[in-house]
Image (cartoon, rainbow, N blue to C red):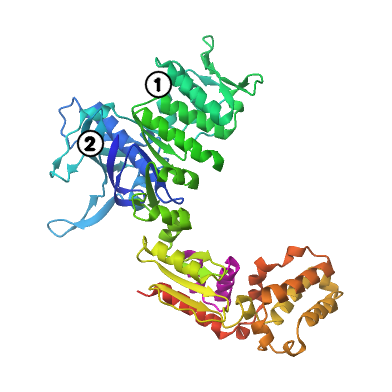
Amino acid sequence: MISKIRIKNFRQIEDQTIEFTSAVVIVGPNNGGKTTVLQAISLFAIAVTNWATERTNSRASKRTGVAISIEDLLNIPVTEVNQIWRGMAVREGIKNEEGKPTAKNIRIEIHAEGLTKNIPWRVGFEFDYGRDTLIYARLTTDPQTNKLYDFPEILIQERIGYLPSISGLSSVEDKLGKGSIFRLIGQGKTADVLRNVCLFLYEDEDKSRWKKFVEQIEQIFKITLNAPQHNIVNGTLSMTYNELGKKSMDIASLGSGAKQTVLLFSYLMAFPNSVHLLDEPDAHLEVIRQSNIYDKISDIAKSNDTQIIIASHSESVLERAFSRDTVISAVFGEFEVINNKKYLKSTLTTIGYEQLLISKQKPRILYVEGTTDFDFLKAFAKKINRIDIADFLENEVCVHPVANDINAVRQHFTTLKEFIPFLTGFAVFDNLRKEIANEIKGLSFCQWSRNEVENYLPLPLSIQNYVDLISGNGPLSNGKYLPPFQKIITANTIPAALNDIDHSFWKNTKISDDYLTPIFEQFFKEIGFPRGTMDKSKYYKLVDYCDISDIDQEVSMLLNDIYEHFNQT
């Protein structure tokens, strides 16, 4: 079992120390570092194996490195080995003692400690870039003693295996030895070993393992697995299953989720007393089964004295693991155990873990009435040539719709602030016709002076410009439907507002529902266009048909306020 690991300069990880228990789930967004941790442990395992093979009985110095070729990096898909270095930087420029420029290697370091067969161990390796296809690994300095680590020979007995998710299943599978099974799994070829893993479990001296395995699969998928059969004539394996008393079917006919589960369970039960690295074992499984599968994986691991370290982004797996195992958050190469945090469980129940993850990635929350309001803000920023603000909103801000609920904003922000001290927020409401107390540090409130964001469209000019454009390519091109369109506008607009864009009608009417929607529904019905050609979700596109000079200054002022609030030091 690995109880702690420190990783330096590996992929997006600069320097992180992570503590493990017997069952660990690493959760986070794509590219957050979940798989990177599994790959770092795999690299550590390769170093252990190669060192044990070449140096255990050798008189060579501890500082003499052992080679790791790119072919050894079975679970780390790279075309050149420098791709596993942080920022792909393998050397840095320095000045020597004489003040002359030179270069030194940037080293990956992986330190680990754990317990194997009740014997504690500690060891660390450093990795030097050799060439495009070669790395050198050697024992590094123990930071506690400032001396080189001694290699713990008990670690040779620790089996560390990486199991990627299954993809398809080979129709033909040759019988393989244990070493070949591990090699193919290491190459990501899980589809080529499923029957072999099942056979390995079936032939185990402890027959109760196979029986329990079959029972668990039957409970989940209502199928009965039959024992693998070895054809001694051609050396191939076959395996079938029965479903609801029907004739036997080849295991290749199983659904992808069932195949994934058969692989997981058989692998964990066939190779106990190991450290298993599982990359998204919930892949191919529907949400309902994900939590059930995780429960059984965790139980199998604990009953077999096996450690599992799982990378996942499943909310179901997170919820299941939260109360029983260790949950580690992975965001941009930084890791934190989160289910030992005070109040966090109730927090996740209230707002959801995904909200915490998103806010950690983008610690600037923009609260809006609905997502279309955010679309309007971006569209207005582009229209007034504030591309910097438009890009900022697009890439740096976390958007959270709140339907004009002030209390929801306060609760959401203050809850997240407990865990993200540097969090800032800005709330934009429709005109609520009341004052909003602004008493929370880091959170700013504002409301439009007009009814809602749609009221800042210069009307009816913008929709007339929009119709002018589509008329060139549609049924309006002959002018046949222009009079009906003008008639619809007139019928929905008070006379005094038709030629006055500053009239109170444009400021106080709920433009989205009470003006634009009936106009477009009537208009497109009249000309035979689909009803959804222009609906509420697309009204922000009308900003493109505005004249900049007709856009109220309040819009640019609000955009500036948002930008400055989020960028203040």
Mark 2: which amino acid? Gly
Residue indicated by mark 1: 178
Q: Nearer the viewer, mark 1 or mark 2?
A: 1
Does residue 278 show up magenta in the picture? no
Q: Is residue 96 left or right of residue 419?
A: left
Q: Is residue 242 left or right of residue 273?
A: right
Q: Considering depth in this image, is 236 or 256 the residue closer to the camera?
A: 256
Q: Magenta-highlighted stretch: main secondary structure?
A: helix
Outermost residue toward the top in this view: 233
Q: Residues within 10 Å of mark 2 (few under 14, many from 20)?
A: many
* Disc number placed over residue 65 in the picture, else none: 2
Residue for point 49% across, 69% down = 407
Q: Position of residue 512 (x, y in %)?
A: 67, 73
The residues tagged by marks 1 and 2 sit, at their Cα atoms, a distance apart of 28 Å
Query: Quick one: SS at disc 2?
Result: loop
Q: Residues within 10 Å of mark 1 (few under 14, many from 20)?
A: few
Identify the image quadrant of the C terminus: bottom left
Position of residue 358 measured from the top left corner of the image (x, y, whole percent):
45, 58
Residue at the extreme right of the image, as rendered: 480
Mark 1–mark 2 CB contact (< 8 Å) = no
Image quadrant containing the N terminus: top left
* Magenta stretch: includes residue 390: yes
Write down the region rendered in magenta: 370-395
N-terminal of the pair, mark 1 or mark 2, is 2
Give the image quarter of residue 310: top left
